[in-house]
Amino acid sequence: MVGEGQPAAGSCRFRRPPEACELAPGLENTPQRRVSLESNERNFLFQLVLDRRLFEKRIFPCINIPQSGTRKEEKLYPKEQVEKLYLMRRALSTLSPEAAMELLLQKVREFPTNEEFLASLQLK
């Protein structure tokens, strides 16, 4: 566990949502295989894990989906969307990080909005 104000090697803490241009150099400037980006603010709880293997294969964004996520999804989305997000996460967690990101990108490209994508998921 990283102490307050003391990020471990390969990790960063943000007080606000980071911009993509702030995240991009994360893997380029570190020898770590993974870079963990965290925010512990009351309304913005997340952990984003970037994976060098995805970066080396030029799969962008190079997010390790099974190890990344928010802690309070139920506060960010309506209940029916949260259930579908959990379903999607369970399905993607069975795959390697590379396969999970490629599948997610393929599916997201099929729909013009995130809402339509989530609506297409079938709860079982």
Image (tube, rainbow, N blue to C red):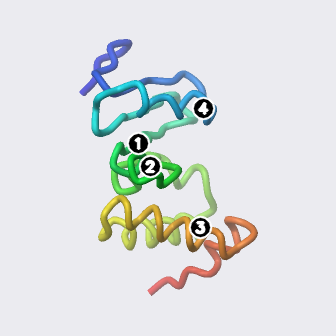
* Most distant residue in the right direction: 112
Residue in front for this viewpoint, 75 or 114: 114
> Dot 2: within a 10 Å radius of its alpha carbon, few (fewer than 14), some, or many (20 or more) residues?
many
Query: Which residue type carries mark 4?
Result: Pro
When the figure is inspected, residue 70 is found, relative to residue 13, above or below; the finding is: below
Upstream in the sequence, badge 3 or badge 4?
4
| Residue at the limit of the structure toward the left, as seen here | 1
Measured in 3D between alpha carbons, the distance from the residue under mark 3 to the one under mark 4, in whole angstroms, is 22 Å
Q: Are marks 3 and 2 in contact (CB under 8 Å)?
A: no
User: Which three-letter amino acid code belongs to the residue tagged 2?
Assistant: Ile
As helix, strand or loop, the secondary structure at mark 1 comes to strand
According to the picture, the residue beneath numbered tag 4 turns out to be 17
Q: Quadrant of the N terminus?
A: top left
Residue 22 lies, with reference to residue 99, above or below; the image says: above
Instruction: Quickly name the residue at label 3.
Output: 81
Q: Residues within 10 Å of mark 3 (few under 14, many from 20)?
A: some
Identity of the residue drawn at 28% across and 21% down: 8
Amino acid type for the residue under numbered disc 1: Leu
> Which residue sits at x=47%, y=51%?
58
Label 3: which secondary element: helix
Cα gap from disc 1 to disc 2, whole angstroms: 5 Å
Residue designated by label 2: 63
Earlier-in-chain disc, 3 versus 2: 2
- Label 1 belongs to which residue? 50
- Asked whether 10 or 57 is in front, the reply is 57
The alpha-carbon separation of the residues under discs 1 and 4 comes to 16 Å
